[in-house]
Image (tube, helix red, strand yellow):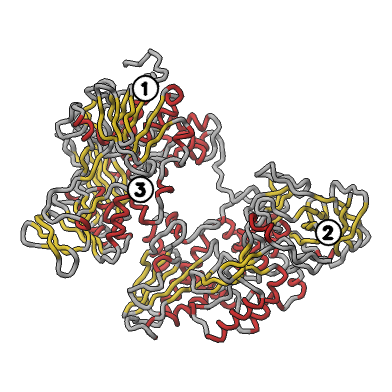
């Protein structure tokens, strides 16, 4: 598979004080999630190589607020009423990838990070 | 009518009785705002809050008191009703307007009696203890259950509606059940002679003994069973327990003692307003006698409750003027329906009869002397005619030119009465008095969901008999308003699972993207359609689920081929086919569990479950298991789980076939088959059924001539007895039938539908299934078998496949950029093993792994 190393892919709200490389593009799994360690925080990374708006990567907190378990990265990716969402694998509630909001329980919200593909590197934005 | 105009503020209202009618009365008072203005006290003799007596026999089918309850536990309190449960009312002091209970006295301004009825037990010498059980309350059922311990046979005295229900209950407790009826036919009130005979034939075919025209003279100690019942003519029947269900008597003791007027045959006499001879006291339900009659059904009781509630609310109310005693029931799985003048007692009435002795079906249509309207009907064996006939009878709809068409077998042009033919006044739900007009109002108000409709109108929430008709009317009204009735899988596919399966096969589609592009909407799918399509693709083509194109479709359990537990760790279940394992392999399981500190538990399916593995440990653990000869057990998949077995003829003195050998063969044949839901098998080596095959999706029981095949059973949340599909099969035929059954299920079931629910949704029921599987009526058998053979031939252990591929193993990392385990997973020791720590225990755990 050829990879467009020169292209920089950024998430919609990708603005950050500085960019921190987390892992390589080869660590991502197409249309699914993996988890990276970021100074004590767990970041779930979802890769959509071929979405309607082109290639996209999202970074969202890995801890499921309902169960307290670190499982969001192992959830199922989907699209509901236009929003890209991740379904938690334990209790199946849905979180929007764009802003971390929960569709079923508005009080549950996951942290999201700006994220971009910079050549071979997956980078998240740090405040 | 006499609506009350004076204010009734601070009035004290007491309701005695918390059965179905007493509860409905409270519901009606709440709904009409009476509870806001009055102090309402509700007394119930039983400890439990009101429960569904209509479905009492399901108590032995796995439902508990809570699931049978008619309301939430806090319902009364939430609406300001003071419920005194488990408190018996001892006396009504009419002079002081107080009821006397063991708790003290409670004054009332108005009193509603809803004390119901009690079972009549004829005075028979020797009837006591386990030979004098009754069937009315949950406590009664507990007593029956206790009596059934160690019992082999049970007898019900009384072949009426409740008696047959009781016989069903005995049967579901595993007893050989018998019914003893005094009259010359079953259900003498509702059925005529031919109907009674058809019902008897059907019930006997189910293995229930039916003894008619028998009067029990005495009960003495038995020789082979605990008791012997001696009948009038020197005959006898032995049994271990006796349940009396010989009719009900109104519970009118309180009223009698208080000097209220009674009906000629008992019951508190009431007028059209349900008022007793004391104007401050009302009576509703089975304790009330209207015009001398007591109504032993729930619908008339509800209707009385509504009449009283409306009066107390000061609303205009419809007087109670008798009730329609039409009923539609499933007794021991046999459809029985009775409408209006079922016996044709009206002078000059004429009848049409349809008798099918081959399948013991009977239908009778009674028409008015002028031949223009339906005045009664009897149905045995098939209630699909009931709704139409009832509508004809209740609404005086003119009969078609050829009335016999209404009871002739469908498919011969029977003029079914469509939902559109019903007038708006037609009653859909007689328990809650919901008319077709009321349903239309809800649809006009924007209700497009059946659940919402039921919540708003309560229709189909009483006896549930009208559920099919309600759905039909609702969908018809929606269509009539241009609303498309939605049977879509999800927002991405406007197809049912069954339709998608057909498309995938016919068009040879091999990926989710292809299916979505051709037949779906959007670009991504969701957590409903992705696993459903993943399962269909696997059933059809059996590609390894670890394929990169299939991975994003799977739920986490399928993706990582293990079962995620509440703390995010996984459990591992290697296959132990038929529950047979060598000591060496057992030792390996113990060693692996010890090495990785896995909590170990024996499963219900004769396997061993190892809990607490983190994601990154799974490949290492499986590497060791596969090296020792294990393979995946698919405990994570919607697929074949286990084939449970007893030791069979190899060891057991009773066994007649090699059940372990057959279980091993079947498990190895069907392992890996992806299906709409999980599938469980069992094989028993003799009729003692130690492997509990009749609670499985596929159950095989040895006979001295071969194997009996049972299908579509279930344990779990909604237990269901499996049904006998074929008998005395040889090995080869058994396997062919199972191939066909499983593939037909895979092909036609809905997403996440177990075989039991699927079977119940099959039009034509078991007979249809037999035609397809055994008689090959759809000419499909060869194709189904070939598809199964493809799945069998392409089987590969998914874990062995994954371990060979470095790319696939990359997914099994807790963190892609760090080797540490998840630091938030904590365990504590309990009974010598570790288990997930509870939140309250977390502060006790030393942080041992603060890694650099």
C-alpha span from label 3 to label 1: 30 Å
- The residue that mark 1 highlights is B312
Callout 2: residue from which chain? A
- Give the residue pinned by disc 3: B55
Question: Residue B368: which quarter of the image?
Answer: top left
- Which residue is labeled 2 in the image? A38
Are callouts 2 and 3 both on one chain? no
Residue found 83% across the figure and 59% down from its top: A38
Which of the 4 quarters of the picture holds residue B810? Answer: bottom right
User: Do marks 3 and 1 both belong to one polypeptide chain?
Assistant: yes
Marked residue chain, label 1 = B
Looking at the picture, tell me which residue is in the foreground, B798 or B271.
B271
- Image quadrant in which you'd find residue B254: top left
Q: Is residue B683 above or below residue B84?
A: below
- Label 1 and label 2: CA atoms lie apart by 68 Å
Residue located 65% across and 65% down the image = B827
Q: Nearer the viewer, mark 2 or mark 3?
A: 2
Chain designation of label 3: B
Residue B143: which numbered mark, if any? none
Q: Nearer the viewer, mark 3 or mark 1?
A: 1
């Amino acid at each position: 598979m050829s990879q467009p190393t020169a292209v920089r892919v950024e998430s919609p709200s990708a603005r950050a004080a500085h960019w921190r490389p987390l892992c390589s593009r080869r660590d991502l799994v197409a249309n699914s999630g993996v988890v990276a360690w970021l100074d004590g925080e767990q970041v779930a990374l979802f890769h959509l190589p071929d979405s309607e708006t082109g290639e996209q990567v999202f970074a969202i907190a890995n801890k499921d607020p309902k169960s307290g378990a670190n499982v969001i990265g192992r959830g199922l990716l989907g699209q509901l009423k236009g929003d890209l969402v991740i379904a938690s694998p334990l209790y199946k509630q849905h979180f929007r990838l764009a802003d971390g909001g929960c569709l079923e329980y508005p009080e549950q919200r996951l942290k999201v990070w700006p994220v971009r593909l910079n050549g071979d590197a997956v980078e998240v934005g740090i405040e | 009518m006499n609506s009350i105009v004076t204010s009734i503020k601070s009035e004290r209202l007491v309701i005695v009785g918390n059965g179905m009618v007493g509860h409905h009365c409270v519901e009606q008072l709440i709904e009409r705002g009476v509870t806001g203005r009055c102090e309402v006290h509700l007394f119930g003799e039983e400890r439990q809050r009101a429960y569904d007596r209509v479905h009492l026999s399901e108590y032995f089918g796995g439902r508990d008191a809570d699931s049978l309850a008619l309301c939430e536990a806090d319902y009364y309190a939430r609406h300001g009703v003071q419920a005194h449960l488990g408190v018996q009312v001892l006396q009504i002091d009419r002079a002081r307007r107080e009821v006397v209970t063991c708790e003290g006295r409670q004054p009332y301004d108005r009193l509603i009696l809803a004390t119901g009825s009690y079972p009549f037990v004829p005075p028979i010498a020797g009837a006591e203890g386990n030979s004098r059980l009754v069937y009315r309350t949950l406590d009664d059922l507990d007593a029956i259950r206790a009596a059934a311990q160690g019992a082999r046979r049970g007898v019900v005295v009384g072949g009426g509606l409740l008696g047959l229900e009781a016989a069903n209950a005995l049967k579901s407790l595993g007893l050989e059940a018998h019914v003893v009826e005094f009259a010359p036919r079953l259900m003498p009130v509702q059925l005529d002679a031919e109907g009674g005979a058809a019902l008897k034939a059907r019930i006997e075919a189910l293995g229930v003994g039916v003894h008619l025209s028998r009067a029990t003279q005495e009960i003495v100690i038995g020789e082979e069973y605990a008791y012997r019942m001696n009948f009038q003519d020197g005959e006898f029947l032995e049994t271990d327990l006796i349940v009396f269900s010989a009719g009900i008597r109104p519970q009118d003791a309180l009223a009698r003692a208080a000097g209220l007027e009674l009906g000629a045959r008992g019951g508190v006499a009431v007028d059209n307003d349900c008022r007793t001879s004391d104007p401050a006291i009302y009576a509703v339900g089975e304790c009330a006698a209207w015009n001398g009659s007591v109504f032993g059904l729930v619908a008339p009781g509800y209707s009385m409750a509504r009449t009283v509630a409306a009066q107390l609310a000061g609303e205009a109310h419809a007087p109670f003027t008798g009730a329609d005693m039409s009923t539609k029931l499933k007794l021991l799985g046999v459809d029985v329906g009775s409408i209006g003048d079922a016996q044709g007692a009206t002078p000059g009435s004429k009848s049409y009869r349809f008798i099918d002795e081959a399948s013991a079906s009977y239908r009778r249509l009674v028409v008015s002397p002028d031949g223009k309207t339906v005045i009664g009907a009897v149905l045995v064996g098939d209630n699909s005619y009931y709704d139409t006939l009832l509508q004809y009878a209740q609404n005086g709809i003119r009969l078609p030119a050829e009335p016999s068409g209404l009871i002739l077998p469908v498919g011969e042009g029977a003029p079914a009465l469509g939902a559109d033919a019903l007038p708006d006044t037609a009653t859909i739900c007689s328990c809650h008095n919901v008319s077709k007009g009321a349903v239309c109002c809800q649809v006009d108000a924007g209700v497009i969901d059946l659940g919402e409709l039921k919540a708003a109108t309560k229709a189909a929430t009483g006896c549930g008999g009208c559920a099919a008709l309600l759905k039909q009317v609702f969908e018809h009204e929606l269509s009539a308003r241009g609303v498309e009735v939605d049977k879509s899988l999800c927002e991405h596919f406007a197809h049912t699972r069954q339709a998608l399966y057909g498309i995938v096969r016919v068009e040879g589609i091999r990926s989710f993207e292809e299916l979505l592009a051709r037949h779906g909407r959007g670009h991504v799918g969701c957590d409903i359609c992705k696993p459903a399509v993943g399962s269909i693709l696997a059933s059809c083509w059996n590609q390894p689920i670890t394929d990169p194109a299939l991975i994003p479709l799977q739920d986490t359990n399928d993706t990582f081929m293990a079962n995620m537990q509440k703390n995010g760790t996984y459990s591992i279940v290697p296959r132990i086919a038929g529950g047979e394992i060598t000591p060496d392999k057992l030792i390996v399981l113990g060693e692996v569990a010890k090495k990785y500190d896995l909590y170990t538990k024996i499963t219900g399916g004769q396997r061993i479950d190892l809990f607490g593995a983190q994601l990154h440990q799974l490949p290492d653990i499986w590497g060791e298991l596969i090296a020792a000869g294990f393979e995946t057990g698919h405990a994570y998949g919607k697929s074949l789980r286990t084939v449970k077995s007893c030791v069979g003829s190899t060891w057991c003195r009773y066994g007649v076939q090699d059940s372990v050998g057959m279980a091993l063969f079947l498990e190895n044949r069907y392992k890996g088959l992806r299906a709409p839901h999980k599938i469980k098998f069992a094989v028993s080596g003799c009729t003692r059924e130690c492997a509990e095959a009749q609670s499985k999706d596929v159950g095989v029981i040895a006979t001295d001539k071969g194997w009996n095949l049972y299908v579509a059973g279930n344990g779990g949340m909604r237990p269901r007895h499996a049904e006998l599909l074929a008998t005395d099969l040889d090995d080869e035929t058994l396997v062919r039938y199972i191939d066909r059954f499983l593939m037909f299920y895979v092909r036609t079931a809905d997403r996440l539908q177990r075989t039991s629910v699927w079977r119940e949704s099959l039009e034509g029921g078991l007979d249809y299934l037999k035609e397809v599987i055994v008689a090959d009526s759809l000419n499909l058998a060869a194709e189904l078998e070939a598809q199964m053979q493809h799945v069998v031939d392409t089987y590969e252990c998914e874990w062995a496949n994954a371990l060979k591929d470095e790319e696939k193993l990359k997914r099994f990392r807790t963190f892609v950029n760090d080797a540490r385990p998840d630091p938030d997973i904590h365990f504590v020791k309990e009974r010598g093993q570790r288990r997930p720590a509870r939140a309250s225990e977390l502060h006790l755990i030393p942080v041992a792994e603060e890694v650099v």
